[in-house]
Amino acid sequence: MMEGATKHRSTNPFFYLPLRLLIFLMKKHTSLLSLLLFLLAITSCKPKENMIYMESDRSATEEQVRQAVYEGSHLQSGDFLDIKVTAYDEFAVRPFNLHSMNQLTNPSESGGAQSAQAAPQGYLVDNEGYIIFPVLGKISVRGLTLAQLRQELENRLTEYLSDPLVSIRQLNFNITVLGEVKRPGQYTTPNDKVTLLQALGMAGDMTDYGDRTKVKLVRHENGTDKTVIIDFTDKNITSSPYYYMQQNDVLYIEPDIVRRRSANVDPNRALVFQIGGLALGIISILLTFRR
């Protein structure tokens, strides 16, 4: 199989054409060869400006950058919440906390290595956007922020408790970063306040071939997926309404034109160009010194 492929390449009149052209230029037109090598070098390099984040006026030593307003992540089906209720009367507040109720119904599971290995307790937002809360029953939470849900619960709990306080954490805040990054994948964080730059940092930053001017953000809203293009070289990125990530957001970094061109080149032909370019560079230097 390999012998057939090698024979096919050797009989192809166009396979060695680039190498033959380079040899001809090397013998007859050294100055033209030097110019071609120079053009090859500058076209294969990536401009430094395209690798800078939040580019601004370099003459300014300090700059005021507008910050986007953080509204909080909006809850959706599949979210897993840790909700704790506190009040002055510790006994009265127990029915409203999963952990306290489990200790009362299963005393053997309180403390010790067994509880340390137990699955995290919390409230799962079902497919219809509801959670089942002790005493209060079904509560619609889809589309609410954590702050809005906290206020809703505190208002309802005043019927049973004096000055109740509610704390909520999202246990499975997931974001995905794909494309030209060093560590693509899905990331889970207990903090739902994650910015675009922080998400990029989780994935190890972009590679040198990432297009920083056309980063795609895919967000699920109102039952549909919406895609927006974000320019990471823009200094005003921090004031973008998409600066803060939402649950299940996907960030995709496209390859730049250099990477796309190299991906479309036949590997064998690219190897010929690389070897030929290296050889020509060495010969050009030798010819220069001989003069």
Image: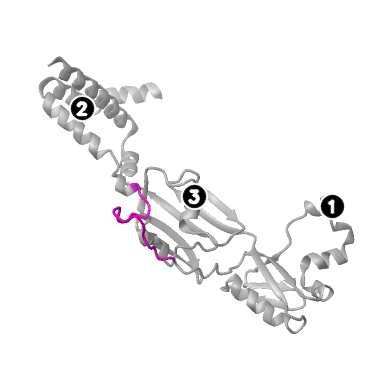
In percent of width and height, residue 16 lies at 23, 25
> Mark 1 = which residue?
112
Rendered image quadrant of residue 258: top left
- For disc 2, the marked residue is 17
The secondary structure that most of the magenta stretch takes on is: loop
Q: Which residues fall within the magenta stretch? A: 51-67
**In-front residue for pair 139/55:** 55
Q: CA distance from mark 3 to mark 2?
A: 45 Å
Camera-side residue of 265 and 221: 221
Q: Amino acid at mark 1?
A: Gly
Q: Which residue is mark 3?
A: 201
Under tag 3, what secondary structure?
helix
Report whether 241 appears left or right of 23: right
Q: Position of residue 78 (x, y in %)?
A: 62, 64
Residue at 32% in and 48% down: 50
Labels 1 & 2 near each other (Cβ < 8 A): no
In reply to whether residue 86 is colored magenta, the answer given is no
Q: Residues within 10 Å of mark 1 (few under 14, many from 20)?
A: few
- Density class for disc 2 (Cα within 10 Å; few <14, some 14-19, many ≥20) is few
Residue 169, given in percent of the width and then of the height, sits at 65, 64
The amino acid sitting under disc 3 is Gly
Image quarter (top left, top right, bottom left or bottom right) of the C terminus: top left
Ranked by sequence position, the earlier of labels 3 and 2 is: 2
Identified by mark 2, the residue type is Leu
